[in-house]
Image: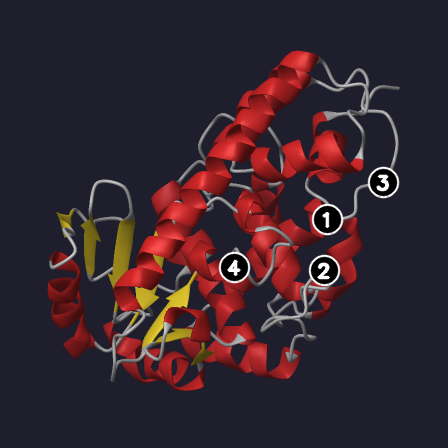
Amino acid sequence: MPPSLLDTFRVLASFDPPRGSLRGAPWEQYVDWAIAQGLAPLAAYNLQYRLGGAGVPEWVMDRLLAIYQGSANDNVMKLVNFKQMVDELQGRRLVLFGGAAFADSLYPHVAFRPVTELQLLMKRLDVEGFAGFLSNHEFKPEDASGTGASKAVSDGRTLILLYSDVLGPQRREQAAGILERATPMKMYGPSIFRADLEDAVLLAALEHARHGYEVPWLSFIDLRELVTGAKSMGGAYSRPLDVPTLLARAAEWRLERALYTSLAVVARLFPEAAAEATAAFPPLRRATRELLDRTVVGAVSTPGRSTALKGLERVRRLLTGQ
């Protein structure tokens, strides 16, 4: 039997894909979907260098490799430019999170993880000052609506989102804890830090919930690696989750339902990560779990889905505790 779309996704989203043929896979459906989901660079590398082509049509390889090369160039441009801007910035505590923080800490090659924007958490009083600093490098204000960010700026190539009350105005103390626990990212100079592992997991779940789970599947690979301790790497996130700490923070942040939903999606998509994901499930009522499984998890875990979740705004409010 030829591989299904889900089978194809699982093989090509692995950092250690099983050897074998993917002949007969639904390439017409997979390629465009994978590009839209941010999956193409990793898939291209696996097909070219780990699976020896795996019986894939030439047009598939051509399209995916073009995306791989573009992702490598774009990531290097964005991250090198960012480093040049902030390398000598002194006396600030700016926490880089999301894709830009994951590309070098979760993925064996920076090209595997396309960085669409840079996300930075900071004190409220630092938002305008840092935006002013970026304006000296040709960054201008952009519309930040729908992002949860306090401010957005762009130089026409790189979008940078500046967050302060990332958990909402009622939980500023908890947001301050993220800043306090963050660890230095020395490659970017003395003012840039990386979110603690448990905070990174919760911020990923918050991002999922804020967008009503209409997010690229690449973000579930991020979460898979966070939950399983980034075993392919030897960096900041290469350790087991502290589950009691994670669950305590999820309760404080009122993100237990979002955490459950994101982990349940990971468990469904990646059987090899299911044990770690389910071990970190928050203690929700059975009825709540069943509701989330039925209305969100099942739909989100369906590859190639083209229709939006029903009641998207209601889902977002439910999962972010609003």
Report crowding for label 4: few under 14, some 14 to 19, many 20 or more residues within 10 A (C-alpha): many
The residue sitting at 16% across, 47% down in the picture is 142
- Residue 114, horizontal then vertical, whole percent: 48, 44
Q: Quadrant of residue 31?
A: top right
Label 2 amino acid? Answer: Ser
Mark 3 or mark 4, which has the lower sequence index?
A: 3
Q: Indicate whether 262 appears above or below 187.
A: above
Circles 3 and 2, Cβ within 8 Å, touching? The answer is: no
Label 3 and label 4: CA atoms lie apart by: 24 Å
Residue 232: which numbered mark, if any? 2
Q: Do the numbered discs 3 and 4 sit on residues whose CB atoms are within 8 Å?
A: no
Secondary structure beneath label 3: loop
Mark 2 neighbour class, 10 Å CA radius: few under 14, some 14 to 19, many 20 or more: some
Q: Which residue is mark 3?
A: 18
User: Taking the image as drawn, is residue 181 in sight?
Assistant: yes
Q: Quadrant of the C terminus?
A: bottom left
Question: Which residue is the site of mark 4?
Answer: 102
Q: Is residue 134 above or below residue 125?
A: above
